[in-house]
């Protein structure tokens, strides 16, 4: 049976010692984020999720969801009871707006709970998790009446929400959607079409589901400029929110998937369903990006989460499984064999996992703080700076984070050897569940093009220079700290190489657009290595200061510095390969004619 224990000590380190969340107490929403409160939230959320949600992960994967002849969908045994306890405990309301019944705490607190929930049971976490994007879209683009009707119930978890974007013939290219919205005399619309891959599209956890659906009105342009967004409830409601008749929307099928079996990924059929437009006609793309950006950060958290739970199980196995002897001599001569943790190759995989997981946690929670500051910082300049940084790094958190999460999951399966391939041990589920995060909410190839093409080149390099200034400023402030010199020198060196590479690809892309696509994935990976190097140098500096001050938790901080050293010595050199690949340009990628790929 797989194990999971929320990594509360490391979370407290990031929240309290790295981000110093309590230092923002002068900003709206941060008043309640004092250290005692955040520590309590971290510990209690971790305990609740480990005890209530994690035990359902393996059984939920094996049972899956069931679609009944009348179109109803039931979730795996225990999911409904666990969700009721989750809702009643208020864990989903932490970072939700107070005006709609939320607790109004910083986004950071919501994201750390989302990590725990996804690590414990990713399929379960997706039910309330997707609702957050729908809430953001309605809060930003919905009318006051729509907000008053839907948001309090969605925030409370009484109703959950979905995003309906993809259709059988189109995914990323949303301008091709065929779902139609025909205006009616009463101001509503009749929505007709089919959507696929709709996570949590139908289930038994709540009495209503609020679908946000992209569709085109009859006279809309036949492109992405003709997309509108609509609220389409599963069950129609009156102005007071009382439930009425079932709407003309149903689950046509549940997708048979590689992983996340406990989540109902549905084919949704809209047969003249009643819907209401959100925002302006033909402006649905902007509303959609509000949902997508929230979802992409959440998917980045899923990458971290699957890495964390796989790492915990990899460590547990490496400490108890006995095979062979340490090369330096028996570590435990009284036993017939040593634990496999003594072997260098097992250590390599465990240290890789530790460095990537803890580095990603720092980057993800720092990113969540930028979301907070983009809305609540003291002045317009600070709010814009935070918005720019999280805009730039959202594709990095999603793309690099989920690639790293999948790597860690497969490495931890490898630690288990043949037993990692056996279903009952749970390791192969972590691999399957981690795989989807590289695909949905925009594949990682799309994230790479968004980063380089839209964010970096689209801003004329301004966003890249802003990130460079942030990391460069850190290097300057810590340049004279002797105990961290080894990290600062390497970080500053990579930052210089990254900056030069950014300028060079911009020059090549101006001559040949294919250069952007050819360089984009390597650029995303390179930026991920750079950001984690910055996070590790930052964490090492904080831990060095703690050790100098005589901290009682010296072992924890010594481990941080040792892991930082591993990252810089054993992981960061991989960044050079991406620099070399970018420097090669598009030529070798684009030379072979398309028909030569055929067989």
Image (cartoon, grey):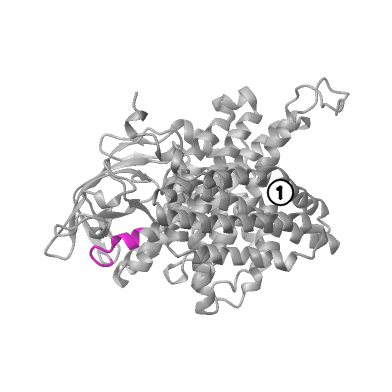
Q: Is residue 575 visible?
A: yes
In the picture, measured across the screen, residue 222 lies left or right of residue 439, that is left
Q: How many marks?
A: 1
Residue 201 in magenta stretch: no
Q: Position of residue 298 (x, y in %)?
A: 49, 53
Residue 286 in magenta stretch: yes
Q: Is residue 156 visible?
A: no
Give the answer, above or below, for where 287 lies relative to 302. Answer: below
Residue depicted at x 66% and y 72%: 23
| Quadrant the N terminus occupies | top right
Residue depicted at x 44% and y 49%: 515
In the picture, measured across the screen, residue 385 lies left or right of residue 127, that is right
Q: Position of residue 151 (x, y in %)?
A: 37, 64
Q: Position of residue 513 (x, y in %)?
A: 39, 52
Residue depicted at x 56% and y 53%: 527
Toward the left, the furthest residue is 185
Nearer to us in this view, 301 or 208: 301
Dividing the picture into quadrants, the one containing residue 161 is: bottom left
Residues drawn in magenta: 279-288
**Residue where numbered disc 1 is placed:** 568
Which class describes the residues within 10 Å of circle 1: few (<14), some (14-19), or many (20+)? many
In the picture, measured across the screen, residue 168 lies left or right of residue 482, that is left
Dividing the picture into quadrants, the one containing residue 77 is: top left
Nearer to us in this view, 439 or 460: 460
| Quadrant the C terminus occupies | top left
Residue depicted at x 27% and y 40%: 168
In the picture, measured across the screen, residue 481 lies left or right of residue 65, that is right
Disc 1, SS? helix
Give the answer, above or below, for where 50 lies relative to 366. Answer: above
């Amino acid at each position: 049976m797989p194990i999971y224990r929320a990594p509360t000590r490391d979370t407290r380190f990031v929240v309290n010692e790295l981000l110093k969340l309590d230092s923002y107490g002068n900003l709206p929403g941060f008043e309640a984020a004092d250290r005692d409160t955040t520590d309590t939230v971290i510990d209690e959320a971790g305990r609740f999720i480990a005890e209530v949600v994690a035990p359902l992960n393996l059984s939920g994967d094996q049972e899956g969801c069931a679609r009944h002849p009348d179109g109803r969908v039931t979730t795996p045994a225990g999911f409904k009871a666990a969700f009721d306890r989750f809702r009643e405990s208020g864990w989903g309301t932490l970072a939700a707006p107070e005006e709609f019944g939320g607790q109004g705490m910083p986004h950071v607190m919501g994201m750390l709970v989302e990590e725990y929930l996804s690590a414990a049971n990713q399929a379960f976490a997706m039910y309330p998790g997707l609702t957050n994007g729908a809430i953001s879209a309605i809060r930003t683009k919905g009318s006051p009446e729509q907000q008053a009707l839907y948001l309090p119930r969605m925030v409370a978890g009484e109703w959950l929400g979905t995003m309906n974007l993809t259709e059988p013939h189109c995914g990323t290219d949303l301008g091709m959607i065929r779902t139609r919205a025909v205006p009616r005399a009463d101001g509503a619309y009749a929505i007709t079409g089919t959507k696929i891959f709709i996570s949590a599209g139908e289930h038994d956890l709540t009495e209503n589901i609020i679908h946000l659906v992209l569709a085109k009105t009859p006279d809309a342009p036949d492109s992405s400029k003709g997309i509108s967004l609509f609220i389409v409830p599963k069950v129609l409601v009156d102005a007071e929110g009382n439930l009425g008749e079932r709407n003309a929307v149903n689950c046509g099928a549940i997708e048979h998937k590689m992983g996340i079996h406990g989540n109902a990924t549905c084919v949704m059929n809209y047969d003249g369903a009643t819907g209401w437009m959100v925002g302006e006609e033909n402006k649905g793309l902007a509303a959609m990006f509000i949902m997508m950006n929230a979802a992409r950060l959440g998917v980045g958290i899923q990458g971290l989460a699957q890495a964390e739970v796989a790492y915990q199980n990899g460590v547990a196995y490496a400490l108890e499984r006995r095979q062979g002897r340490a090369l330096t001599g028996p570590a435990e001569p009284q036993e017939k064999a040593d634990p496999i943790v003594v072997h260098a190759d097992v250590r390599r995989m465990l240290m890789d996992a530790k460095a990537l997981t803890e580095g990603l946690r720092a980057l993800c929670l720092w990113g969540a703080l930028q979301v907070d500051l983009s809305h609540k910082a003291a002045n317009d300049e600070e709010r814009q700076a935070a918005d720019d940084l999280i805009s730039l790094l959202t594709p990095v958190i999603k793309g690099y984070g989920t690639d790293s999460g999948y790597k860690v999951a497969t490495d931890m399966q490898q630690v288990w050897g043949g037993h990692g391939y056996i279903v009952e041990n749970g390791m192969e589920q972590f691999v399957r569940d981690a795989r989807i995060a590289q695909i949905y909410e925009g594949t990682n190839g799309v994230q790479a093009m968004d980063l380089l093409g839209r964010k970096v080149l689209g801003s004329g390099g301004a966003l890249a220079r802003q990130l460079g200034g942030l990391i460069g400023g850190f290097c300057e402030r810590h340049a004279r700290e002797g105990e961290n010199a080894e990290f600062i020198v390497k970080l500053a060196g990579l930052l210089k190489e990254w900056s030069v590479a950014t300028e060079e690809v911009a020059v090549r892309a101006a001559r040949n657009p294919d250069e952007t696509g050819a360089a984009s994935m390597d650029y995303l990976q390179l930026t991920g290595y750079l950001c984690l190097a910055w996070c590790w140098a930052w964490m090492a500096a904080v831990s060095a200061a703690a050790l100098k001050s005589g901290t009682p938790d010296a072992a924890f901080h010594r481990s941080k510095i040792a892991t930082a050293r591993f990252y810089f010595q054993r992981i960061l050199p991989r960044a050079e390969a991406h620099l070399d690949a970018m420097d090669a340009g598009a030529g070798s990628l684009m030379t072979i004619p398309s028909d030569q790929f055929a067989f």
